């Protein structure tokens, strides 16, 4: 059996024809009934052809007909859909505008990369289809993007420009989009188990959406998003670095879940970005500063203050490295005092607990009773042992310290209150010594931290 004479067609010819079943003349294959073509009389001939070519199915491309192959658009291929372990697609819905819907079809058992050729169609959708081998759509000519909805790509798919993925499953297969220019959009919506997405040295001229999708790993190096980019509710399981990435328009990171760290240090945001309810660890201080600045521009002061605190934490980490080499000692002391006293003005409870404990410590240390002096020494050691603990643990320990030593020392509450008042020295006859002066300065500083921390979460810009 010879090969079809039509250029680029590998199908075998039908009987004595020099063209295959797709390209041979078909005027005598149908009848006109009710002003429509009836292909039923040719069903046996078409079925016979497919039975013959299935003897060597490996290497045969799945072929979706050209627009002028009307017979195949009108003929149901249900009875032809399975041969030699290969399930062929069949048209469930073909309309006048050449819209083709392939539903619940499988493509399998080739042990080679399966090429699916699509020519001259306006709309193509694959719904709930399983691609058990690599599905290569490199040979296609369609007028609108190919839509994949709830499809399963068991061995991956070489991505082409005109593709949209909705609720698809990728079984942790990688997708390489290196050195690409996407003239239209880039859609991965609510997709599951994507392996590594390589989007490097590429430009997306249309909108880009990764909404609700799940990525094991991503690489966005040197990528430009010319239109809106949506990362809302997406999940990234590894560190994400938007290195030299440009967001020319609105970038949405609302409720995005970065399981590890996110890095915007070398990113460029030309317009507004939304980071509300984003979950992530900051890779560096600059990332926290960029997000803080975005909230400040939107007058969202509460969220801006939260990322201000994260910015300060990263600054502390930098100073911790400097202190090991003997640099920035004064800056390190100031930052540590700021963090311990109020968590960088973000915690209003912490300075109150410090005020109570320091006032109690001072009262016990100047007491005429020896056992109170001993209690003051023990209390100081206890507080120092938890000085660099996490904020929550530090608050618990400070509260416990105050309650225990307050009841053991029998310090009068009125006396303690008078010591807390930074202006009490003006109305008393108590002489000012260096210890008292240092105590009053400390109390005044903590009261200031309390006022600032309350204002940080209530003020309007």
Image (cartoon, rainbow, N blue to C red):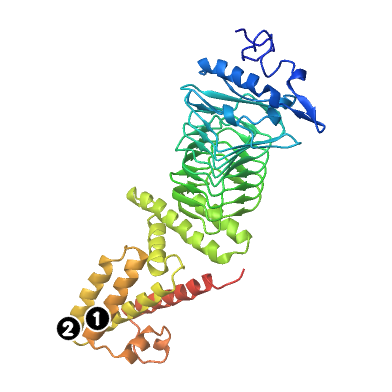
Please indicate, yes or no, whether residue 381 appears anywhere in the rendered image: yes
Residue highlighted by disc 2 = 371
Which residue is found at the position 56% from the left and 39% from the top? 244
Q: Please identify the quarter of the rendering in which residue 268 is found.
A: top right
Residue 214, x across and y down, in percent:
49, 45
Q: Which of 100 and 290 is in front in this view?
A: 100
Q: Which residue is drawn at 41% across and 74% down?
A: 349
Residue 284: where, in percent of width, then height? 46, 49
Q: In front here: 173 or 1?
A: 1
**Label 2: how many residues lie within 10 Å, few (<14), some (14-19) or many (20+)?**
some
Q: Are marks 2 and 1 in contact (CB under 8 Å)?
A: no
Looking at the picture, does residue 126 appear above or below residue 373? Answer: above
The CA span between labels 2 and 1 is 11 Å
* Residue, far right: 35
- Quadrant in the picture for the N terminus: top right
Tag nearer the camera, 2 or 1: 1
Per the image, label 1 sits on a secondary structure element best described as helix
Q: Mark 1 sits on what residue?
A: 405
Report whether residue 89 is seen.
Answer: no
- Rendered image quadrant of residue 411: bottom left
Residue 414 pos. (x, y %): 34, 91
409 relative to 185 in the view: left or right: left
Q: Which of marks 2 and 1 is nearer the N terminus?
A: 2
**Local SS, label 2:** helix
Q: Which residue is drawn at 38% across and 75% down?
A: 442
Question: Where residue 32 is drawn, which disc sits there?
Answer: none
Q: Indicate the quadrant where residue 424 lies.
A: bottom left
Q: Which residue is drawn at 56% across and 19% down?
A: 51
Mark 1 Cα within 10 Å, few/some/many (few <14, many 20+)?
many
Image quarter (top left, top right, bottom left or bottom right) of the C terminus = bottom right
Q: Is residue 241 left or right of residue 5?
A: left
């Amino acid at each position: 059996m010879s090969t079809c004479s039509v250029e680029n067609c590998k199908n075998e010819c039908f009987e004595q024809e020099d063209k295959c079943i797709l390209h041979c003349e078909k005027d005598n294959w149908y009848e006109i009934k009710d002003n429509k073509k009836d292909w039923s009389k040719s069903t046996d001939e078409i079925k016979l052809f497919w039975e013959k070519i299935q003897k060597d199915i490996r290497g045969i491309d799945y072929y979706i007909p050209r627009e002028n192959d009307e017979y195949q658009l009108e003929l149901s291929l249900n009875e032809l859909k399975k041969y030699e372990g290969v399930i062929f697609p069949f048209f469930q819905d073909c309309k006048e505008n050449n819209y083709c819907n392939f539903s619940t079809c499988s493509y399998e058992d080739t042990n080679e990369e399966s090429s699916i050729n699509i020519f001259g169609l306006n709309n193509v959708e694959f719904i709930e289809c399983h691609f058990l081998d690599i599905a290569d759509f490199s040979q296609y000519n369609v007028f609108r993007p190919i839509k994949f909805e709830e499809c399963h790509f068991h061995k991956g798919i070489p991505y082409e420009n005109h593709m949209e993925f909705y609720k698809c499953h990728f079984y942790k297969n990688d997708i390489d989009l290196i050195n690409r220019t996407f003239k239209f959009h880039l859609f991965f919506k609510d997709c599951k188990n994507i392996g590594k997405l390589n989007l490097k040295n590429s430009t997306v001229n249309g909108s880009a959406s990764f909404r609700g999708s799940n990525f094991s790993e991503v690489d966005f190096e040197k990528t430009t998003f010319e239109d809106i980019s949506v990362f809302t509710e997406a999940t990234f399981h590894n560190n994400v670095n938007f290195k030299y990435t440009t967001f020319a328009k609105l970038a949405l990171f609302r409720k995005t879940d970065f399981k590890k760290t996110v890095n915007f240090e070398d990113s460029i945001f030309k317009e507004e970005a939304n980071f509300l309810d984003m979950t992530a660890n900051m890779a560096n201080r600059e990332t926290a500063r960029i997000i803080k600045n975005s909230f400040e521009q939107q007058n969202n002061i509460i969220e801006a203050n939260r990322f201000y605190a994260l910015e300060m934490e990263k600054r502390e980490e930098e100073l911790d490295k400097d202190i090991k080499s003997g640099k920035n000692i004064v800056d390190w002391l100031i930052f540590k005092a700021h963090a311990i006293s109020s968590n960088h003005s973000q915690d209003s409870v912490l300075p109150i607990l410090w005020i109570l404990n320091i006032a109690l410590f001072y009262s016990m240390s100047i007491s005429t009773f020896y056992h109170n002096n001993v209690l003051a020494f023990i209390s100081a050691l206890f507080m120092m042992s938890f000085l660099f603990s996490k904020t929550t643990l530090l608050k618990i320990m400070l509260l416990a310290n105050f309650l225990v030593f307050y009841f053991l020392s029998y310090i009068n509450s009125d006396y303690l209150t008078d010591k807390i008042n930074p202006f009490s020295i003006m109305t008393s006859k108590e002489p000012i010594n260096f210890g008292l002066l240092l105590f009053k300065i400390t109390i005044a500083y903590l009261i200031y931290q309390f006022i600032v921390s309350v204002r940080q979460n209530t003020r309007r810009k």
